[in-house]
């Protein structure tokens, strides 16, 4: 790929045109272990230079650290980068000083409060796509989306998104205001979106930003059985990375390896290319934290999976093939998409 020459995809019928791959920035704030700040900034700059326009973050990623990191990268990027960049921000997660979680807050007053702080940290006058990270079970989604719609009317937000919402919630949200996209985990080993949710968003003209396309490195070809996970690494408590579950899931990677060798690609590139191949309305978010991982991920755009490849992958990775849930039980219970 040459500079600024990435293909683009529409983010739903009402959202912006964005690069076919977005950059998920969460891992740059230590949720997958130690990070190098200079390398993170360099990776953000390289992504923008390559033509990546969609930067995804959450205001609760290390309590604002991630938004400040993005702000620094945009402030120090070459001229024009800020104009090309689109920020996708999740809000609503409640934290305490000891890193504990306290649920999610989707009350209209809280929505506007969260937005005010994000605008300040990002150093911008608007957020391009704004969404609650998890549906607040105590607040009707109509009220949460209605508050974001008021932010749109005021010019503080450009588009409304959803995250990990189920079909009924999606329909209710869309009855209030146009929804650009649904952000949800989607990969070869996380395919629950195919059980009704994908058909719902397509019916309503809502795009998909898919996170976890490499299942947090599990199917990237880079994760090994003896890899040590520090106490701050999310994967240390993820069921899919535990004991026999990990052995089972790593064995699945062998199917990817065979196809990768035949296609002259890496395992990660095949996994990302599969998500890309699921529809032009789907934009994978790659979680690259380093320049080499970014370059590898961008290379997936040069991989073409033919019908035989897709059939082989579907046979090797049927729905439910992974061992273990994608989150611990307490977090799974907060997923409206899994109800």
Image: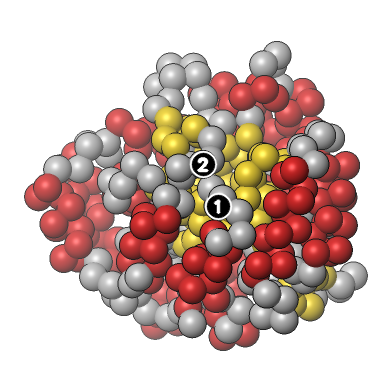
Q: Does residue 18 appear left or right of residue 251 in this picture?
A: right
What percent of the width, then of the height, locates residue 261?
Answer: 20, 44
Q: Which residue is mark 2?
A: 14
Residue at point 12% right, 47% down?
307
Q: Secondary structure at mark 1?
A: loop
- Are discs 1 and 2 less than 8 Å apart at CB? yes
Residue 267 in view in this figure: no
Q: Does residue 262 appear left or right of residue 329 in this picture?
A: left
Quarter holding residue 34: bottom right
Give the residue furthest to the front: 175
Compute the Cα span from label 1 to label 2: 7 Å
Q: Does residue 264 appear left or right of residue 137 in this picture?
A: left
The vertical placement of 20 against 223, above or below, is above
Q: Secondary structure at mark 2?
A: loop
Q: Which residue is mark 1?
A: 179
Mark with earlier residue (1, 2) = 2
The vertical placement of 246 against 8, above or below, is below
Residue at point 87% right, 49% down?
116
Which numbered disc covers residue 79? none
What percent of the width, then of the height, locates residue 332?
Answer: 55, 80
Quarter holding residue 40: top right
Pick whichever, 294 or 53, lies toward us.
Answer: 53
């Amino acid at each position: 790929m040459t500079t600024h020459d990435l293909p683009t995809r529409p983010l739903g019928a009402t959202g912006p045109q964005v690069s076919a791959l977005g950059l998920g920035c969460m891992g740059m704030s230590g949720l997958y272990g130690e990070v190098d700040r200079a390398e993170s900034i360099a990776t953000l700059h390289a992504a923008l230079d390559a033509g990546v326009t969609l930067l995804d973050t959450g205001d609760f990623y290390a309590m604002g650290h991630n938004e400040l990191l993005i702000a620094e990268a945009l402030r120090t990027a070459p001229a024009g980068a800020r104009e090309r960049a689109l920020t996708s921000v999740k809000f609503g997660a409640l934290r305490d000083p000891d890193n504990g979680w306290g649920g999610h807050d989707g009350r209209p007053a809280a929505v506007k409060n969260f937005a005010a702080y994000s605008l300040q940290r990002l150093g911008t006058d608007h957020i391009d796509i704004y969404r609650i990270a998890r549906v607040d079970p105590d607040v009707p989604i109509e009220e949460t989306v209605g508050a974001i719609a008021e932010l749109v009317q005021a010019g503080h937000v450009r588009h409304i998104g959803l995250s990990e919402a189920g079909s009924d919630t999606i329909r209710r949200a869309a009855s209030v205001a146009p929804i650009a996209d649904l952000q949800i985990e989607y990969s070869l080993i996380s395919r629950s979106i195919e059980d009704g949710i994908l058909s719902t968003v397509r019916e309503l003209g809502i795009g998909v930003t898919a996170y976890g396309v490499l299942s947090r490195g599990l199917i990237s070809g880079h994760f090994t059985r003896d890899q040590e996970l520090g106490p701050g690494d999310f994967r240390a408590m993820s069921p899919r990375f535990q004991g026999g579950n990990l052995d089972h899931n790593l064995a699945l990677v062998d199917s990817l390896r065979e196809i990768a060798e035949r296609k002259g690609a890496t395992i990660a590139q095949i996994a990302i290319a599969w998500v890309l191949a699921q529809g032009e309305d789907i934009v994978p978010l790659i979680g690259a934290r380093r320049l080499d991982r970014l370059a590898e991920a961008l290379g997936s755009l040069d991989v073409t999976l033919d019908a035989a490849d897709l059939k082989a992958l579907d046979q090797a990775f049927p729905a439910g093939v992974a061992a273990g849930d994608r989150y611990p039980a307490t977090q799974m219970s907060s997923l409206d998409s899994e109800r």
